Image: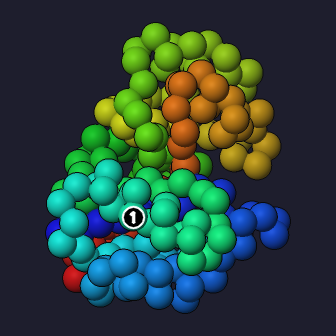
Amino acid sequence: MTYIALLRAVNLAGFNKVGMSDLRELAAALGGKNVRTLLQSGNLILESDVRTSGEVERLLESGARKTLALETEFFVRTAAEWKKLVAANPFPKDAKLDPGHLLVMCLKDAPSRQQVAALQAAIKGREIVRAVGPQAYIVYPDGVGRSRLTSAIIERHLGTRATGRNWNTVLKLQALTKAL
């Protein structure tokens, strides 16, 4: 099975530093095959005999803690789940015209409609949020860096942990799964 694993909050301003070669070595030591990384932000693609995304998450989190002294969360999806994530994008126009301002937040748990509505109500800018299963899609028309809609606000209102990638990275990760 092919998996995409996203690390939460690594290599940000010197916080939770991890080398991508170390990450690849960790995944290989845990039984991963054809291990690849994308960018320096903790994007990992691997093949594994492990049966579920949750099991892969637990293995990687435990291994990172023990081997790399890295306390972070992994968000794992199968290649098939990632394909559905791409297809479920509720903002196809934004994906085409301004993919750098469209983020997909992978969530540990799927939020309720009430949680998504509460997050939308808390937004102070022009951002728009839609959730589909354990993903939230967010359009940041004025840019992520200028937005007051932070990960902390998103996690608080959705009641779950999250990590985000822009649409360009989402598509690059999908392309890498096809290359395996």
Q: Residue at x 52, y 79 (%)?
A: 23
**87 with respect to 147 (left or right):** left
Q: Is residue 130 above or below residue 53?
A: above
Closer to the camera, 62 or 27? 62
Q: Quadrant of the C terminus?
A: bottom left
Q: Residue at x 25, y 76 (%)?
A: 47
Residue 153 location in percent, x, y?
68, 29
The answer to which quarter of the image holds residue 91 is top left
What amino acid is at disc 1? Leu
**133 with respect to 180 (left or right):** right
Q: Residue furthest front?
A: 66
Residue 140 visible at all = yes
The answer to which quarter of the image holds residue 92 is top left
Q: Secondary structure at mark 1?
A: helix
Q: Quadrant of the N terminus?
A: bottom left
Residue 43 location in percent, x, y?
49, 69
Closer to the camera, 16 or 79? 16
